[in-house]
Image (tube, rainbow, N blue to C red):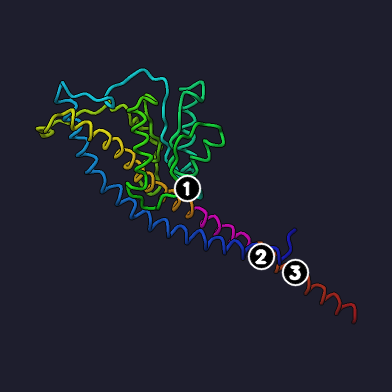
Amino acid sequence: MASLRDVKNRITSTKKTSQITRAMQMVSASKLNRAEMNAKAYVPYMGKIQEVVAAIASGSADASHPMLTSRPVQKTAYLVITSDRGLAGAYNANVLRAVTTAINTRHASADEYVIFAIGRMGRDFFAKRGANVIESEVGLPDQPSFSDIKEIARKAVGMFTDGTYDELYMYYNHFVSAISQEVTEKKVLPLTDITPEAGTASYEFEPSPEAILEVLLPQYAESLIFGALLDGKASEHAARMTAMKSATDNASDLINSLTLVYNRARQAAITQEITEIVGGAAALE
């Protein structure tokens, strides 16, 4: 059985750990508020650019672009959004599991797919398994801007247009609430599911629909990636806040349990000392 000193030392170390996890919980809660606002503020922009793209793609029979056309799939790209750090519960594991399952289902060889990794956890995961990680972006701030991922987004879109691969899927955690995040698979390219909503305003395009698509479609695809990153960041902070709260609660339960063990052992030791004193006094009579 552990000594009183060992139990007391464990109580002290657990209290220090709980102080750290509580502080991390509060920091994540603060970051979550801002990240959630950033993600929500981006939604109107995405809605408007999608409306314009859909109007062009469906309103002109002459409008065409390689990003709007499906072609035989010989190679697939996966853009995976994870975090740079752990201590976020199953946030990273759920995304990586979904991507791995999709790869194992769709491909028989590592030559059939490539990986774009945003986040150190995803990059390291696939690099250790010998996957072809052709581009990665790590060390992003907690509140990223488009400039932080501009290069990887443009490369991902540009390599599809160049024919390096034939479709691009994106995997990330969609923010539902502070306690719920959903792993999401989104097909970014080709853009074959863009349809205008009922009641959408009509547009006149200058100089031509083709010229506008040439500029707008890459921006739209890149915007999808950035929107997913903002969504993923909100999910990351929420997952870390929940994980740290759970860790703090578990530490509190452990402290209570250890304190009970300590008090019982201390009481037993005091009782033993009293018994020995009484026994010694009786022997002297």
Determine whether the residue tagged by mark 1 lies in a helix, strand or loop.
loop
Q: Residues within 10 Å of mark 1 (few under 14, many from 20)?
A: some
Residue 175, placed above or below residue 108:
below
Q: Residues within 10 Å of mark 3 (few under 14, many from 20)?
A: few
Disc with the residue nearer the chain's start (2 vs 3): 2
**Does any portion of residue 175 appear in the rendered image?**
no
- Which residue ends up furthest to the right in the rendered image? 284
**Does any portion of residue 229 appear in the rendered image?**
yes
Q: Which residues are magenta?
A: 246-260
Identify which residue is drawn at 19% across, 27% down. 57
Identify which residue is drawn at 42% across, 40% down. 81
CA distance for labels 1 and 2: 33 Å
* Front-most of residues 26 and 279: 26
Residue 222, quarter of the rendered image: top left
**Does the residue at mark 2 contact the one at mark 3 (Cβ under 8 Å)?**
no
- Residue located beneath label 3 in the image: 269
Spot occupied by residue 269 in the image (x, y as percentages of width and height): 75, 69
CA distance for labels 2 and 3: 18 Å
**Does the residue at mark 3 contact the one at mark 1 (Cβ under 8 Å)?**
no
Under mark 1, the amino acid is: Asp
Determine whether the residue tagged by mark 2 lies in a helix, strand or loop.
helix
Identify which residue is drawn at 65% across, 62% down. 10
Under mark 3, the amino acid is: Ala
- Residue located beneath label 2 in the image: 9
Looking at the image, is mark 3 or mark 1 nearer the viewer?
Answer: 1
- Residue located beneath label 1 in the image: 84
CA distance for labels 3 and 1: 49 Å
Q: Residues within 10 Å of mark 2 (few under 14, many from 20)?
A: few
